[in-house]
Image: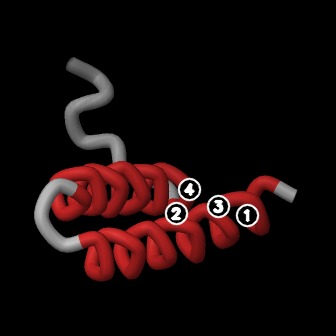
Amino acid sequence: MFGLFKKKNEAEKLQEEYAKLMKEAFVLSKSDRKQSDAKTAEAEEVLKKIDALKN
């Protein structure tokens, strides 16, 4: 209950965005490999931002 109104920090937001992009890439991999690769590249950029925040 106390965490109900807790705001997410930048790293948590980026983690959610990374997970969403990887899920989209997986779905696209079944139909359009080129778009799947583009989504994976976007996810890798988000992952680099996450690593930069942690260091």
- Pick the quarter of the image with the C terminus: bottom right
- Pick the quarter of the image with the N terminus: top left
Q: Nearer the viewer, residue 29 or 46?
A: 29
Q: Which element carries disc 2, helix, strand or loop? A: helix
The reply to whether the C-beta atoms of the residues labelled 3 and 4 are less than 8 Å apart is: yes
How many residues crowd mark 3 within 10 Å: few (<14), some (14–19), many (20+)?
A: some
- Residue in view at x 44 percent, y 67 percent: 40
The amino acid type, in three-letter code, at marker 1 is Leu
Is 37 displayed left or right of 45 in the figure?
left
Residue 50 lies, in percent from the top left, at 64, 61
Residue occupied by mark 1: 53
The reply to whether the C-beta atoms of the residues labelled 3 and 1 are less than 8 Å apart is: yes
Q: Which element carries disc 1, helix, strand or loop? A: helix
Is 42 displayed left or right of 11 in the figure?
left
The reply to whether the C-beta atoms of the residues labelled 4 and 1 are less than 8 Å apart is: yes
How many residues crowd mark 2 within 10 Å: few (<14), some (14–19), many (20+)?
A: few
In the picture, the disc for residue 50 is 3
Marks 3 and 2, how far apart at CA: 9 Å
In the picture, the disc for residue 11 is 4
Q: Which element carries disc 4, helix, strand or loop? A: helix
Disc on the earlier residue, 4 or 1: 4
In the picture, the disc for residue 10 is 2
